[in-house]
Image (cartoon, rainbow, N blue to C red):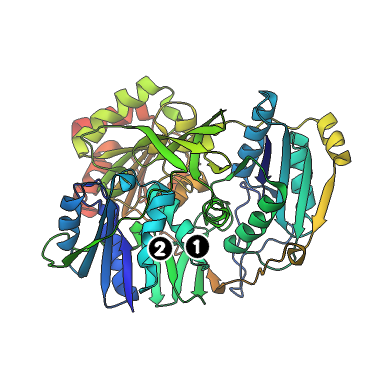
Amino acid sequence: MSALVFAEHDNLSIKGATLNTVTAALACSGEVHVLVAGHEAAAAAAAAAQIVGVSKVLHADAPGLNHGLAETTAAQVLAVASGYSHILFPATASGKNIAPRVAALLDVAQISDATKVISGDTFERPIYAGNAIATVLSTDAIKVITVRTTGFDAAAAAGGNAVVEVLAAAADTGGSTFIGSEIAKSDRPELTAAKVIVSGGRALGSSEKFNEVLLPLADKLGAALGASRAAVDAGYAPNDWQVGQTGKIVAPQLYVAIGISGAIQHLAGMKDSKVIVAINKDAEAPIFSVADYGLEADLFTAVPELIEKL
Amino acid sequence: MKVLVPVKRVVDYNVKVRVKSDGTGVDIANVKMSMNPFDEIAVEEAVRLKEKGVVTEIVAVSCGVTQCQETLRTAMAIGADRAILVECADELQPLAVAKLLNALVTKEQPGLIILGKQAIDDDCNQTGQMLAALAGLPQATYASKIEISDGQATITREVDGGMETLKLKLPAVVTTDLRLNEPRYVTLPNIMKAKKKPLEVLKPADLGVDVAPRIKTLKVSEPPKRGAGIKVPDVATLVAKLKNEAKVI
């Protein structure tokens, strides 16, 4: 049977995490469909039809689907669920919010954060902040899965030619109402999709220093900015910059950890990065145990020097 | 209003777990166990709502082994009024826990259920959403702010890229994120008081719930080790290595 991918999108375009999820879906089944549930989301549906490997796009459109509210969006997925052997969501804030509702109403278990598809019913997923990898077998008829995007390559976003089928939209359940959002506008790449990440820790000392020291480096490298939990808790960086077990899971080509000691919860979020650079003045900092290149130095002199030499 | 706060007993967050050599799981014999940190935030939030006069009774619930009673005593030391343990020695997966909690929601009729967004052992991030679905309730996950008024909850949620605010009709399910609050330290007098608070023990069968696992763990292994890197003496060497060896800049 076919696999269904729940698309993450902004009604106009498809978010990158969807592409990695399509790759995971293709490992589960030869036929992959994508569901675009949104409001005035025809452009996003058209973009989904371009993804290589996708044979059909299901497009549901209604005001009630505009903000991805869990209740109505899950109902939309359930309306088509019975036709699929696998339903996959990107393990993003939105995917993780909706997928368990779908699983519970189908009376099936959910595989969270799959990092590898071994067969149609067997998957690998990290547990204990990535300190152990479990190989799990689902005995349910429909497999509901959230996909850790760092575990799968992105499918090509263009070159495909899927048909778009319009679905009847699920009724608005009315239990929750969207009031508003504050989404930071930034010219920087998205943290989870960035090729380079510059990440700062508590050693930066203040929000002003965090920006003063790290922004020029991030600009120079075209990098996204990240932070350790300690830096976020201290108010140096916004919440959604947090990299770690319960924050963002990232795997860029280059991760530059500055003034981050490297608690296991932080390492859980970045240790799959291709190249890790750590700059820290504490020789014993655990971050050095995962860093490809460690520089034991005071960050306030090393980072400006690094910017100059790049 | 009554609040139900489900809490899970997990390996303490400071413990670095070891994978058993036979690959059947991680070794949790003789390691420190604590309340899941996100659940502790949930208990604290319920207590704050009670201190504000919004909540009248806090019922802590745990599903699992006999020793979960200790976790429930901790919840009562923070300020929960009474506790229910659904005792079960077998493995409980999120769907089973959500079904047990749903049975308790039917029985207790809380106005609000607050629980952690994920447990730090299995890292599933499922139970709250599953409970909301089974109970037919609205949900707000990853809450960083909760306000209750006029039978509605206004919740600020942490989402990718920023924050979002939702209004939920009560009863509803809310899951906590790190920034919701900072749990208080439990004091000795409160630990003593907690020992006298009522703790009811039920079995899954009493609630008519089938808790059989749906997912089989075939093996648990160590993650691939990252090869130890090198220390570079200065910034110039670092830049040279990144350019010529790693070729990432």
Pick the residue in front: A4 or A93. Answer: A4
Mark number, residue A105: 1
Q: Is residue A182 visible?
A: yes
Q: Say left or right for B184 vs A12.
A: right
Q: Quadrant of residue A154?
A: bottom left
Residue B109, horizontal then vertical, whole percent: 68, 46
Q: Residues within 10 Å of mark 2 (few under 14, many from 20)?
A: some
Instruction: Name the chain under label 2.
Output: A
Pick the residue in front: A67 or B34. Answer: A67
Gap in angstroms between the C-alphas marked 1 and 2: 8 Å
Same subunit, tags 1 and 2: yes
Q: Amino acid at mark 2?
A: Leu
Instruction: Name the chain under label 1.
Output: A
Q: Residues within 10 Å of mark 1 (few under 14, many from 20)?
A: some
Q: Is residue B234 above or below residue B101?
A: above
Secondary element type, mark 2: helix
Secondary element type, mark 1: helix
Residue located beneath label 2 in the image: A78
Q: Are marks 1 and 2 in contact (CB under 8 Å)?
A: yes
Q: Say left or right for B183 vs A197.
A: right
Q: Is residue A290 visible?
A: no
Q: Quadrant of residue A155?
A: bottom left
